[in-house]
Image: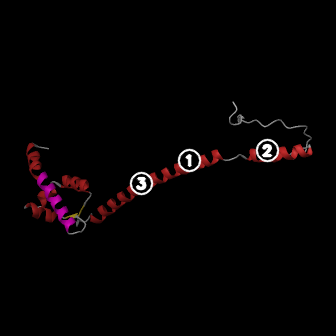
């Protein structure tokens, strides 16, 4: 970029941004969506469209900051619209995918808590096997004689009654 170009941009860029913001405020007051028209922008600034086209990259950055779009009438308008729409949809998909992953992690946590607090099948069957085996003297699962089953291990510590220590 030459010095002359830098000086020109230093003059035009603040004017262009001010005109775009002014157009956006007018659209907001009229309660209609804002879409920048470069011909109107050139008219507001008292210059030609080719002059505005020289600052097109700057204009696109300003529109991106303002989350606004530009009115297009060239042959690529449909293509640009579809690209913009595709980008918005991709962003939406990324947001929804992240949300889905978060919900799946939360669901896994819920299942872990439920599983951690529940009884295992061995604990459910063990009580019935002990009762029946003690009554009949035979294992109800395999049919062999059982003299006595070993005491079930537990981590419960018996506490003395209240008031006695």
Answer few, some or many: residues within 10 Å of disc 2's Cα (few below 14, many 20 plus, some between 14 and 19): few
Q: CA distance from mark 2 to mark 1?
A: 28 Å
Q: Which mark is residue 59?
A: none
SS type, badge 1: helix
Residue 23 magenta: yes
* First-in-chain label (1 vs 3): 3
Q: Which mark is residue 126?
A: 2
What residue do we see at 73% from left, 36% from top?
A: 154
Quadrant for the C terminus in the image: top right
To which residue does mark 3 refer?
A: 95
What residue do we see at 53% from left, 51% from top?
A: 104
| Left or right side of 133 for 83 | left
Q: Quadrant of residue 17?
A: bottom left
| Left or right side of 7 for 33 | right
Relative to the observer, which residue lies in front, 119 or 56?
Answer: 119
SS type, badge 2: helix
Asked if residue 142 shows in the view, the reply is: no
Range covered by the magenta-colored residues: 13-29
Q: CA distance from mark 1 to mark 3?
A: 21 Å
Q: Quadrant of residue 27?
A: bottom left
Asked if residue 40 shows in the view, the reply is: yes
* First-in-chain label (2 vs 1): 1
Answer few, some or many: residues within 10 Å of disc 3's Cα (few below 14, many 20 plus, some between 14 and 19): few
Residue 21 magenta: yes
Q: Which secondary structure is most common in the magenta stretch?
A: helix
Q: Which mark is residue 109?
A: 1
């Amino acid at each position: 970029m030459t010095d002359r170009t830098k000086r020109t941009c230093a003059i035009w860029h603040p004017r262009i941004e001010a005109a775009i913001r002014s157009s956006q405020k007018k659209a907001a007051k009229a309660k209609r969506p804002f879409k920048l028209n470069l011909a109107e922008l050139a008219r507001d600034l008292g210059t030609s469209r080719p002059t505005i086209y020289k600052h097109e990259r700057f204009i696109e950055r300003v529109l991106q900051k303002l989350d606004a779009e530009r009115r297009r009438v060239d042959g690529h308008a449909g293509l640009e619209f579809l690209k913009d729409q595709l980008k918005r949809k991709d962003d939406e998909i990324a947001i929804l995918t992240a949300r889905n992953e978060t919900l799946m992690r939360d669901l896994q946590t819920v299942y872990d808590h439920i599983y951690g607090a529940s009884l295992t099948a061995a604990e459910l069957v063990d009580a019935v096997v002990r009762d029946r085996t003690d009554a009949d003297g035979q294992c109800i699962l395999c049919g062999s004689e059982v003299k006595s089953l070993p005491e079930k291990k537990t981590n419960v510590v018996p506490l003395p009654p209240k008031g006695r220590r």
